Image (tube, rainbow, N blue to C red):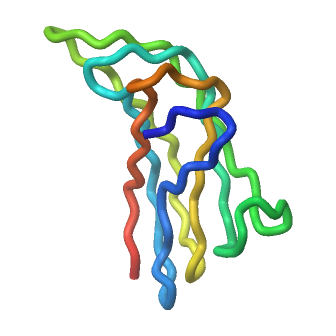
Amino acid sequence: TIQNQSSNYLVFTSDATNGGYIQRIRFAPVPFNVTVASVVKVWINNGNTSTNPANTTYYDNLALPAATASSNAATPSYDLPMNFALPAGYKIFCTLGTTQASSTGWIATAIAGKY
């Protein structure tokens, strides 16, 4: 679950030998909770230390609206298309622009494969 704006969250790691392919990342609010509006930023890392700017490249961002959980209505999810191959050991990280309250936040799911 992505909650804190100052943290990078690992979403996907390609295979260490053969790499991988990422189709998209799906973001959904944590069920049965309320989220605040934010933006999620997505980063591609070359497999080395993610805090070193030389190892990580900004990819894209996606606006995430505030969401209120309901027991009788669906809560939408939001997809960020990617559609590219990743070299061996590369990683995808996400960062939120706004900190979410405790027990809330967004779930990031990579639709991807390792080869």
* Residue 103 position by quadrant: top left
Residue at 70% across / 74% down in the picture?
48
Q: Is residue 29 above or below residue 33?
A: below
Towards the viewer: 6 or 23: 6
Compared across the picture, whether 57 is left or right of 24 comes to: right
Seen in the image, is 65 located left or right of residue 51? left
Q: Is residue 28 left or right of residue 39?
A: left
Looking at this view, name the residue that lies furthest to the right. Answer: 54
Q: Residue at x 33, y 17 (%)?
A: 33
Question: How many marks on residues?
Answer: 0
Residue 40, x across and y down, in percent: 60, 35
Of all residues, the one furthest to the bottom in this rendering is 17
Residue 74, image x and y in percent?
A: 23, 17
Q: Say above or below: 23 vs 45.
A: above
Q: Position of residue 55 (x, y in %)?
A: 78, 68
Image quadrant containing the N terminus: top left
The C terminus is located in which quarter?
Answer: bottom left
User: Residue furthest toward the front?
Assistant: 102
Q: Residue, x 50% and y 85% (percent of image)?
A: 16
The image shows residue 65 at horizontal and vertical percentages of 51, 16
